[in-house]
Image (cartoon, rainbow, N blue to C red):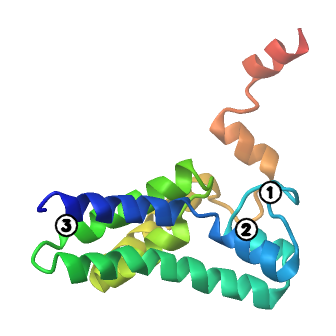
Amino acid sequence: MQILIPALFITFCFCLGALPLTNLIAKSLANIDLIKVGTGNISVAAAFVHAPKPVAIFAVLAEISRGITPVLTAKLLFPEIPTWQLVGLIFLVVGRYFIAQGGGVTNASWGVLVYSPVVALASGITGFLILLVISKQLFPRKNQNIRQWSARLGCLSKRYILICKY
């Protein structure tokens, strides 16, 4: 019995992540198959691009709920062990990535926010600062064009151009 509850919890989280929820919502409410339109990516962003706004907002709320569910379920089932909240969230994202072919960014972000708002805030600030530093390295001047940026990254070096010509 001690191993049955964690095994069922992990299976539940994986299966919850495996549901193509955003595509199901877009199909049922707007008759739009996200796999067949645009890039074929099933995501909240694709729902906002291809579906009406109310349908996309409902898809976002469904994805947020999906991200929060494993964390709250783990708090209920394993109140003494907070690690299970993250384990559930990891298996949700694994199911989302490998079966439903989505990134699980919305799910993970909201799940971490419910798990620990301090960790979510610190991660957001750290990510913003890293992006700020990287963008200063890539674009030191305001009006730098893409050719200069590509050359800085080594994409348009003379050796590469010579190889492409011959």
- The residue carrying mark 1 is 35
Q: CA distance from mark 2 to mark 1?
A: 8 Å
Residue 23 tag number: 2
Residue 153 locus on image (x, y percent) = 64, 39
The foreground one among 122 and 113 is 113
**Image position, residue 160 (x, y; %):** 75, 20
Q: Quadrant of residue 10?
A: bottom left
- Residue type, numbered disc 3: Thr
Residue that appears at 22% across and 65% down: 5
The residue identified by callout 3 is 83
At x 49%, y 55%, the residue is: 95
Helix, strand or loop status at disc 2? helix
In the rendered image, residue 13, in percent from the top left (x then y), is placed at 40, 65
Quarter of the rendering occupied by the N terminus:
bottom left
Q: Earlier in the sequence, mark 3 or mark 2?
A: 2
At a point 46% along the width and 75% down the height, the residue shown is: 67
From the viewer's perspective, is the residue at label 3 or at label 2 nearer? 2
